[in-house]
Image: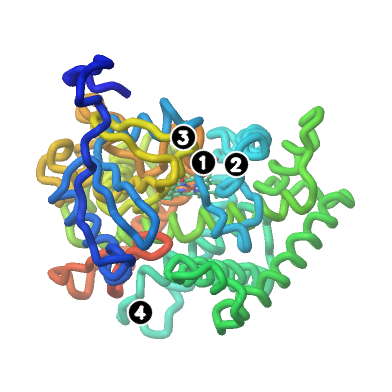
Amino acid sequence: MKNPNVDQGQSSPRTVNDQKVPGPKGRPFIGVIPAMARDPLSFMCKCAKRYGEVVKLPIGPKRFYLVNNPEYIKHILQENDRNFRKGYELTRPVVGNGLISSEGELWRKQRRLIQPAFHREKIASLVAAMATNIGEMLQRWQSRANPSAPVDMEAEMFRLTRHNLIKTIFSLELPEEIDRAGEAFEAGLEYLQQLMKAPFKLHALIPTPTNVRFWRSRKKIDHLIYAMLAARKDGNGKNGDLLDLLLNASADAAHDTMSDQQLRDEIMTLLMTGHETTASALAWTWYLLTRHPEEETRVVEEIKSVVGRRTPTAEDLPKLEYTGMVIDEVLRLYPSTWIFARQPLADFELGPYRIPRSAMVFLTPFIMHRHPDHWPAPETFQPQRFLPEARAERHPFAYFPFGGGPRYCIGDVLAKTIMKLVIVIVLQEFRLQQVAPDKEILPKPKATLRPGGPIEIRLEPR
Ligand code: HEM
C-alpha cells in the first residue's frame, strides 16, 4: 500500500515507510506488559486516542502494532491476507487443528468442507429445533420458586446458549451429557484465559488446578465425541443437526474426507468459538435494551406484528429487521471478539509505516467501533445506524465484529439466528426490568468481552 502524497523516488532521502511508528515506550525490557496486564482494554483505547492509526506497543521483547484505520484493516484481512498467518498455536491444546487455529492448505480444505453446513438455508433448517429448545429453557424461569427474585442474565444466557449450541450441533438429549460437554468447554475456556495471561509457554505443562481440570475434562469430552461419531457411522445418523451436516459434507466430498481426529477438533472448535461469543452478546443485549425502554418497545412492536404469540419460524427471521439492527448495534458497542491478531509472513507497509515480519498485529473491533471519525456519538446506543442508507455511507471495515476476508466468522448466521430467536421468545413471554438501571456496567476483556458486573433483571410475565 503506497501513500500517494509522499515522494517515492529512489533518490529521495525519505521513503514512504521510514516514519517511526508512534507509541508508548514502556519500561526497559518489559515494555508495556504491566499496563497490558492491568487493563488491556483501557490501555489500548488510551493508546489509540493518543497515538492514532498505528500504534507500536513493546510487549517484552516482541513488537506489537495496534491498527486503528479501516483501510489498513481491510488491507490486512482482505486485500493482502496471504501475507498473514493467525498464529493461534496457543489454542491448539483445546481445539487441536480446528478451523479457528489451522493455517494454509489444511485450513483451506477444512473451510471448503465445513462452509456448506453453515449456509443460511442449512441454519434455517435448524430453527424449529432451536426455538423449541429455547422455549423449554424458559420454562425454568416460569417455574421459579420466587418469581420476583432477579435473575443473573449473563449466567442465564451462558446456560441457554450452551444448551442450544450442544443440541444444535449434536442433538444430545441427556442432561448429564449436556452438562458434561458444557463442563468440558467451560474448563477449556478457563484454561485458555489462564494461558493468555501466563508470561511463559511452559505454564501449559504445570499441573495448576485449572490445567488439571482441563486435562481431565478434555478426556471426557473426547470420549463423548468419539462415541457419538461411532454411533452416527453405525447408521444412527438422521438427527438433522450440525453434526449430520458435517458428516455429510465429509462423505459427499470426492477426495477430501475428514478423519475422526479432525472431526473432533472441528466440533470442539465450534463449541468453543460459538458459545461464549454468542452468550456474551446476548447478555449485553439485555443490558442495553433494559436501559433503553424505547428501543425495547420498538422491538416488542415488531415481534407483535411479525410473529405475534406463536413460535417464531425461519421465515419470520428476515422480517424482524429492527431486531436485526439492535443485534448489530449491540455487537458494535460490545463486540464479543474485542481483539484478534495476525502475524505477517513478510514485512509490509501501512501508509507511511513499515511493519516488520517479526511483529504481531492487533485488530480491535472494540476500538474501531467507537472511533469518532466513523461513528457520531460513538458511545450511545442507536440501532438506526444500521439502516441501509447509513450503512452505505460508512467504510465497510469501520465495523467488523465477525472479522473480514477469507477468515470471516463461519458462524455469523448461526449466532444471529440464535440471538434473534432468544430475543423474540424472551420478549414474547416477559417484560424485563433491570434492578439497577442507572448503574453502568463496564466491559471486562476476557476471552470475549464480558460484562464486568452482574446484569440483574426482574422478569414479569406479559
Ligand atoms: C456473536 C457471536 C460471534 C462473534 C462476535 C464471532 C466473531 C468472530 C471473529 C471476529 C472471527 C475472526 C477471527 C480472526 O480472524 O482471527 C471468528 C471466526 C470464527 N468463528 Fe465466530 N463469532 C461468533 C459466533 C460464532 C459461532 C456461533 C460459531 C460456530 C458455532 C463461530 C465459529 C467461528 C469459527 C470456526 C471461526 C474461524 C473461521 C476461520 O478461520 O475460517 N463463531 N468469529
Q: Nearer the viewer, residue 159 or 62?
A: 62
Q: Is residue 90 left or right of residue 26?
A: right
Residue 125 placed where, x, y %?
A: 60, 40
Q: Is the residue marked by circle 1 packed among few (<14), some (14-19), or many (20+) residues within 10 Å?
A: some
Whole-angstrom CA distance, mark 1 to mark 2, is 7 Å
Is the residue under label 2 in contact with that under label 1 (CB below 8 Å)?
A: yes
Three-letter residue code for mark 1: Arg
Three-letter residue code for mark 3: Ala
Residue 262 placed where, x, y %?
A: 73, 49
The secondary element bearing badge 3 is classed as loop
Whole-angstrom CA distance, mark 3 to mark 2, is 16 Å
Q: Which residue is mark 1?
A: 85
Is the residue under label 2 in contact with that under label 3 (CB below 8 Å)?
A: no
Whole-angstrom CA distance, mark 2 to mark 4, is 50 Å
Q: Which mark is residue 346?
A: 3
State which tag comes first along the sequence, 3 or 1.
1
Q: Which residue is mark 4?
A: 147
Whole-angstrom CA distance, mark 1 to mark 4, is 50 Å
Compared with 421, 373 (above or below) is above
Whole-angstrom CA distance, mark 3 to mark 1, is 10 Å
Q: Nearer the viewer, residue 8 or 406?
A: 8
Question: Which residue is found at the position 69% from the left and 41% from the top?
Answer: 245
Compared with 49, 107 (above or below) is above
Three-letter residue code for mark 4: Pro
Q: Which residue is mark 2?
A: 103
State which tag comes first along the sequence, 3 or 2.
2
The secondary element bearing badge 1 is classed as strand
